[in-house]
């Protein structure tokens, strides 16, 4: 789990096995007790649920106003009711983050995807080549649209919307797809710029079924 600390230089994470500290961001990470109450309570809630604090919460706490705006929009897109399942939303993040070469988002959202879909292999397939992944036609159509938004949004036209409709996907669902792609395009670029490192725990989550 990422350590919360304050000081000059990069924040660090103590990985398992006693290896030397490794940076989770090139920018300082504030100490938990120094954060505004709303941010501190959100981070503690995540820690209680997950058992660790994903490094994105620590890294973005460097700028509190942007932290709040980022997670407010994240929640509006990823936690809403709508035509897309939570797993489908995570697939969009994984596939387009891979195109943007964002290690953090591929690893973190790959872990969430494995958990929601209960498919240990799916996140790796989607990240490498979703067209070869074990996906039904509906999810392939979602990712086709997402990838066009990601790589050629200027070319989006009626035919792209038409391709979604046979799969029960509306224009509002298309908005959701595009918004997720756009939001995580921002996230990908910031994560890459600040050198945000995935937590070690994320690499293993959802790969082995839990013992009953």
Image (tube, helix red, strand yellow):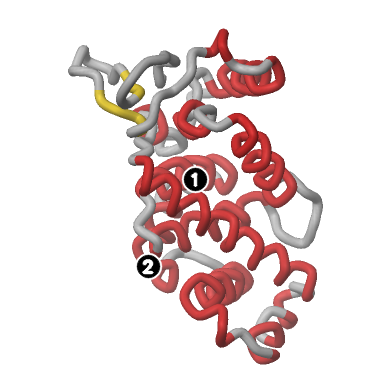
**Residue labelled with disc 2:** 129
Secondary structure at badge 1 equals helix
Q: Residues within 10 Å of mark 2 (few under 14, many from 20)?
A: few
Marks 2 and 1 sit apart, C-alpha to C-alpha, by 16 Å
Residue at the image position 59 percent from the left and 44 percent from the top: 116
Residue at the image position 38 percent from the left and 38 percent from the top: 196
Relative image position of residue 201 (x, y in whole percent): 39, 28
Image-based side of 94 in relation to 176, left or right: left
Image-based side of 77 in relation to 81, left or right: left
Secondary structure at badge 2 equals helix
Residue at the image position 52 percent from the left and 66 percent from the top: 135
The outermost residue toward the front is 8
Image-based side of 62 in relation to 191, left or right: right
Relative image position of residue 17 (x, y in whole percent): 22, 15
Q: Vertically, is 107 above or below 6?
A: below
Residue at the image position 56 percent from the left and 19 percent from the top: 47
The quarter of the picture where the N terminus appears is top left
Foreground label between 2 and 1: 1
Circle number at residue 109: 1
């Amino acid at each position: 789990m990422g350590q919360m600390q304050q000081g000059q230089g990069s924040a660090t994470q103590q990985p398992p096995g006693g290896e030397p500290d490794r940076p989770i961001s090139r920018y300082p990470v504030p100490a938990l007790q120094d954060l505004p109450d709303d941010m501190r309570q959100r981070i503690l809630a995540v820690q209680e649920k997950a058992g660790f604090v994903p490094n994105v919460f620590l890294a973005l706490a460097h700028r509190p106003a942007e932290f709040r705006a980022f997670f407010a929009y994240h929640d509006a897109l990823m936690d809403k009711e709508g035509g897309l399942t939570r797993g489908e939303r995570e697939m969009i993040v994984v596939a387009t983050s891979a195109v943007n070469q964002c290690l953090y988002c591929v690893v973190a959202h790959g872990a969430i995807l494995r958990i929601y879909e209960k498919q240990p292999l799916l996140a790796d397939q989607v990240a490498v080549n979703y067209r070869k992944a074990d996906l039904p036609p509906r999810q392939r159509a979602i990712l086709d649209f997402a990838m066009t938004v990601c790589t050629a949004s200027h070319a989006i036209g009626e035919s792209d919307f038409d391709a979604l409709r046979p799969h029960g996907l509306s224009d509002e669902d298309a908005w959701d797809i595009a918004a997720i792609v756009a939001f995580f395009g921002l996230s990908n670029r910031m994560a890459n710029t600040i050198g945000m490192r995935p937590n070690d725990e994320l690499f293993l989550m959802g790969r082995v079924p839990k013992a009953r």
